[in-house]
Amino acid sequence: MSRQPKYRQVADALRREIDGGKYPPGARLPSESELSARFDASRNTVRSGLSLLVSEGLVASSQGLGYEVRSHEVFELNASRFENLTFPQNGDAYNTDVTNAGRRPHQTFRVELKPAPEDVAKRLAIEPGSTTVLRFCHRYVDDVPWSTQATYYPGWLIEKASRLTTPGDIPEGTTRYLAGVGIEQVGYFDEIATRMPTPDEGRLLEVGAGVPVLLWTRTGYSDERPIRCTITTFRGDLNRMNYEIGDLGAREVNL
């Protein structure tokens, strides 16, 4: 006899059936009354089990329509090519990558002058609290929240690259724009981490409490000093990253 609480037994059984394909993306789960009969459990117990699946991002609930298995079409980002000017690209890297994958990009912007947070200041080699330009993007793929991206530029760049303060998109992408005014990114340092979302991140990315976020911090360098720090926060359930390093001819042959 299972020592798991009954609501967890309900959630575990349904999770196995979802993973096994019995209930594919978009399928509706049986009603609470049907599940109550199947598991010999009260409706409150069944509801608790279903709520656990909702918090994990596996199902969604709609008032009057029951519970539906969520679609999880994962977007794959090639992080080594992202913003790399040696690869063909039509404007902004995000728009290019999403469009090339046959998906539809959409993003909103916020631009402001902000004191540098301590962790960002360390990466940009500037004093904490000194002025930075923050360009904040809320990005979507096919109208589903995909990521938030906060890029900090040191204040000394403003005089040389005034369009960074423009409250909107830079069509060619900021990396290409900076290269065009003589500030070329010649290298970057990436840091990758995971954690549970903050309340604000959960709201912006529409993730449940059980879904982690992926944090990708990229510090870009000119040949003299750091020129930007980009912190991208991804939905952990809808994204996958890869890198291409070295000669991958053998991989291409075997794909």
Image: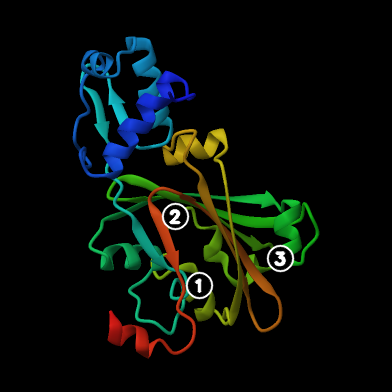
- How far is the residue under mark 1 from the one under mark 2? 15 Å
User: Which three-letter amino acid code belongs to the residue tagged 3?
Assistant: Leu
- How far is the residue under mark 3 from the one under mark 1? 16 Å
> Observer-nearest residue: 74 or 173?
74
Tell me the quarter of the picture where residue 98 sits: bottom left
Q: Which residue is mark 3?
A: 124
Q: Which residue is mark 2?
A: 168
Q: Position of residue 141 (x, y in %)?
A: 32, 52
Image point (46%, 73%), residue name: 243
Q: Position of residue 153 (x, y in %)?
A: 63, 63
The single residue placed furthest to the right in the displayed view is 127
The single residue placed furthest to the front in the displayed view is 1
> Observer-nearest residue: 163 or 174?
174
Image point (46%, 39%), residue name: 204
> Dot 3, how many residues are within 10 Å of its Cα: few (below 14), some (14-19), or many (20+)?
many
User: Which three-letter amino acid code belongs to the residue tagged 2?
Assistant: Gly
Q: Quadrant of the N terminus?
A: top left
User: Which three-letter amino acid code belongs to the residue tagged 1?
Assistant: Thr
Q: Which residue is mark 1?
A: 175
Seen in the image, is 216 located left or right of residue 32?
right
Image point (44%, 55%), residue name: 168
